Image (cartoon, grey):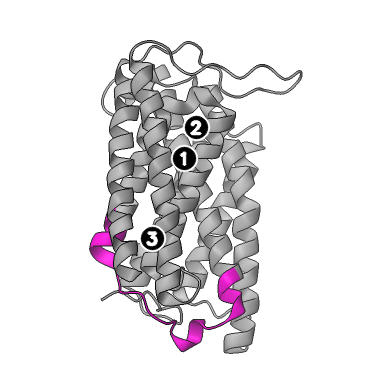
Amino acid sequence: MGALSDQLMVATLIGYLVAMLGYAVEFAFGRVAARELVTVGGPAEPASPPPVGRAALAGRLAVAITLVAYATHVATVVTRGLAAHRVPWGNMYEFVLMVCLFGATAWLVLLATRPAVRPLGVFVMTALVILLFLAGARLHTDAGPLVPALNSYWLRIHVSTASLASGILLVGFVVAALTLIRFGYDAGKRRFPYSFGDRLPEAATLERLTFRVHALAFPVWTFAIICGAIWAREAWTQYWSWDPKETWSFISWVIYAGYLHARATPSVKRTVATWIAVLGWVTMMINLFAINLVVSGMHSYAGVK
């Protein structure tokens, strides 16, 4: 089962990579029929159609390949759990697998509700491919039992919600970055990456989508931190010890809370608020990679060879 999971992971990575190329063709050559992706309140408006033209065939094919890769991704996680005889999120490699799985889930839900976002899949797939490649090349470990410190029912709750929030925030980061690119293009910037701006939806549309994704993810991340504190009380006799991972989780929480507050404050420019959201994802990546691989602490259970 462990070997099968590893093979399925490679198939998943290849599938997302091929899907990324299909989305890229549609993004580069497709003709956008309508740019409005999200309603602004008031009476509900019909969802915008996806891009049209010959390149749209590449987009539809990319969606089909994404679904196949998603199925192999689910199979990767399931077979990993069967091989280890436990929940499949007990080390850093498995955690990244789960983050990417939830990120792909968030993307497919978004795509089902707003078909016009389809060409943006090139950026979501790029993020998934990079993370999965790093997981396979740098973080992989053989399936095995949990270290004793993680053998708790709180693992099922805390880590699963943390990976769920991280997966949604991954999509939120992608949309936030595209929002800034579009804002820059509208301000007259034409150098890379702002040259992509003319292929993107309106900045206001992307900015609203950024807010909605982060507003969904923030309560989940909050719940994950609370569960982690309760688990810490059971394992280490105190709710909070300012361990590096706890500290950076809290830093991320504060920044995302700051983003939501800035987004709700009329005097704060939307570009400033969106940069705060991007900064939040940077802290998430520092917590995931730098803290786990470089800094030693009470959460040093990465399981990396």
Q: Are marks 2 and 1 in contact (CB under 8 Å)?
A: yes
Image position, residue 288 (x, y; %): 40, 63
Image mark count: 3
Alpha carbon separation for disc pair 2 and 1: 6 Å
- Name the residue furthest right: 43
190 or 160, nearer to the observer? 160
What residue lies at 65% left-to-right and 77% top-to-bottom? 230
Residue 182 located left or right of residue 251: left
What residue lies at 59% left-to-right and 30% top-to-bottom? 113
Residue 150 among those drawn in magenta: yes
Residue 182 among those drawn in magenta: no
What residue lies at 38% left-to-right and 60% top-to-bottom? 286
Q: Where does label 2 land, which residue?
A: 271
Mark 2: secondary structure: helix
**Is residue 109 visible to the viewer in this orientation of the structure?**
yes
Near mark 1 (Cα within 10 A), the count class, few <14, some 14-19 or many ≥20, is some
Q: Which amino acid does label 2 sit on?
A: Thr
Span shown in magenta: 133-156
108 or 131, nearer to the observer? 108
Q: Quadrant of the C terminus?
A: bottom left
Task: Mark 2 or mark 3: name the one nearer the start of the chain.
Answer: 2
- Image quadrant where residue 138 sits: bottom left
Q: Do the residues labelled 3 and 1 touch (CB within 8 Å)?
A: no
Image position, residue 117 (x, y; %): 48, 26
Q: What residue type is labelled 3?
A: Ile
Q: What residue type is labelled 1?
A: Trp
Q: Where does label 3 land, which residue?
A: 286
**Is residue 250 visible to the viewer in this orientation of the structure?**
no
Alpha carbon separation for disc pair 3 and 1: 17 Å
Image position, residue 258 (x, y; %): 59, 49
Q: Where does label 1 land, which residue?
A: 275
